[in-house]
Amino acid sequence: MPEIRILSEKLINKIAAGEVVQRPASVVKELIENSLDASASKIFVDIENGGRDLIRVMDNGSGMDEDDLMLSFEQHATSKIREHEDLEGIRSLGFRGEALPSIASVSMVEAASCCNSDNIGSQIIINGGDIRGIEPFPMKQGTHITVKKLFFNVPARRKFLKSASTEYRHMIDVIRRFSLCRPDVEFQFISNGKSVFNLKPSELKNRISQVFAVHYHEKLIGVEAQDGSAKLTGFVGNLDLIRNRSGEQYLFVNNRLVNDRMMNSAVYQAFSPMIEKGEFPFFVLNLDLPASEIDVNVHPQKTEIKYHQDWFVYQFIRRTVAGVLEKNLTVVPTFNHNQRFPGNTLFSSEPGIQQQEIKISPLSGSAGYAPSDPVSSIPEPEPLPHGHPLKERIDLFSSNISRDRQITNTDNIISIWQAHNKYIFAQIASGIIVIDQHAAHERILFEKALTTFQNESARASQQLLFPVSLTVSPDDYSYFADLLHEFEQLGFSLREFGRNTLLIEAVPADLRHIGEGRIVLEILDFFKTRQTVKNRKQYNMAASYACKAAIKSGDLLQPREMQQLIDELFQTQTPYACPHGRPTIIHLTLDELDKRFHRT
Ligand code: ADP
Ligand code: MG
């Protein structure tokens, strides 16, 4: 019979760490929460290697004396609640007394704190949960906590940490969230010795442009409303700030960062007449509710809460935001993507200098593309699951769309016309083909892109007469830094150009002129939403480029352009599906038509 035993405190902490400490960014989150709970007005964060090797959080808060400093690393030691009743009205960010002992059990910690003005505090050193010593330490009032070698004693967890740049981006996200939640607090963030954020106390509106980009400032619409004891304040972005992936949606409840699908969807609902599926509006909102109206003790990371009246809160948010949008966006724009990115605001070119018009017709850039060369090892689109409606649709026509000579020989085409600026109809000897112009162009560009990844000589790029600068958020910037090489392989030339700014000096030769900055950003967004599988960076970059650079449904094409599209499509390896697996061509044979009209 195995004996029942009580676990050691060290083991209990390690187990708790599994819930509280997921990654370096969660350490920073807990430490910043503690600093804010200690009423700090300045918080400095310093990390090395995405926080894998070092995380240091320093504050000028109330600090702790030596006894409290020792105690703070004990499991369930907290100064924030005392009795059961306190749980009902929590206003502090922490209350579980788990963070510090959990963090200390899986890393090497040096914690120093001072709670008075005589500039002498104490420092405690803890390795993997073992206290190594405590001694006096000269410092001003506040607390400094240094966390080294996270998960050094849990190899399985350390191994699963992501690359330094991925962890760094999670860190930016956490710090940005706090900085938006508390614009009255000074935040500094240094990564590998370089300053990322240096944020003085400010109004929320300024803070938003500091942590995203300057051009956000004029695109924000203020929100302020009250209903009973519920209050909603903050900003929503106008339609220029809509992006193709989520990530710039911030909803705080009583100044607490929460992940809240339901309340986020209240905001999306308000935007719904103006956005399409897959588009995400920008917002930073704080919801104030009496502490007794919510339960914050439902998740170890304290990122989820329960509302006593969730329906009321949902409606309050939806109604408020919808009202604000109605008042401020009276002219509901048509959804022309080009209008969203006015070139003069987002992409600052030098004043007075006209941006160069690149006159490239949609399909003229076959330079360097040798279709007769077999494109080696092109990965196929993921096979559709059996019974998938799309699969059936493809199968329905597959007998007709075998790669027979008849179709590939596009000289046979007798006439071509475009319907609804979206589909191309062409009569061929054996019947009619219908082509989805966007999907077809996507397939062409996708294969070209894959070729250029494998074969440098196939790359063709076009130098811009006036390079375009693009300022992005620090995390997008770090994504670009990771993808510079792939962008270059596609034919772009991007250069780092000061803080969070890129200079676009060249674009692929066959890129239509649709705003260099916009396309680069769209490719990035698209890449991010697809970036699930490792080692498929090139594949995903090619697909992202193809999707964003391809002619859109809605673009009017000239007969010559349609002919070229068809020619190039049939020179691809897999003409019948776009990179996402959607069909590009439907072939209606004469036989089929005859059958349908009972001619046979
Ligand atoms: P909790 O925040 O849930 O109380 P923690 O383990 O995060 O638990 O912290 C334990 C205690 O240590 C806190 O309740 C607080 O009294 C003290 N403490 C932690 N960090 C700081 C800090 N930066 N400044 C002052 N006191 C702190
Ligand atoms: Mg805490």
Image (cartoon, rainbow, N blue to C red):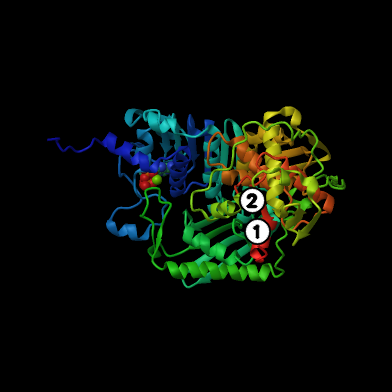
Q: Quadrant of ligand 2?
A: top left
Q: Quadrant of the C terminus?
A: bottom right
- Farthest-out residue, left: 1
- In the visual, does 590 lie left or right of 20? right
Q: Residue at x 64, y 39 (%)?
A: 541
Asked if residue 316 can be seen in this view, the reply is: yes
Label 2: how many Cα within 10 Å (few below 14, some 14–19, many 20+): some
Q: Earlier in the sequence, mark 1 or mark 2?
A: 2
Q: Quadrant of the N terminus?
A: top left
Number of marks:
2
Which amino acid type is marked by label 2? Answer: Asn
Which amino acid type is marked by label 1? Answer: Glu
* Contact? badges 1 and 2 (CB < 8 Å): yes
The disc at residue 400 is 2
Which of 537/324 is in front? 537
**Residue 229: x percent and y percent?**
46, 70
Q: Residue at x 77, y 49 (%)?
A: 514
The residue at which mark 1 appears reads as: 592
What kind of element bears circle 2? Answer: loop
**Residue 536: x percent and y percent?**
57, 36
Q: Is residue 580 above or below residue 148?
A: below
The disc at residue 120 is none
Which of 458/78 is in front? 458
- In the visual, does 575 lie left or right of 257? right
What kind of element bears circle 1? Answer: helix
Label 1: how many Cα within 10 Å (few below 14, some 14–19, many 20+): some
Q: Is residue 117 above or below residue 53?
A: below
Which of 319/438 is in front? 438
**Residue 524: x percent and y percent?**
64, 43
Q: Is residue 6 above or below residue 577?
A: above
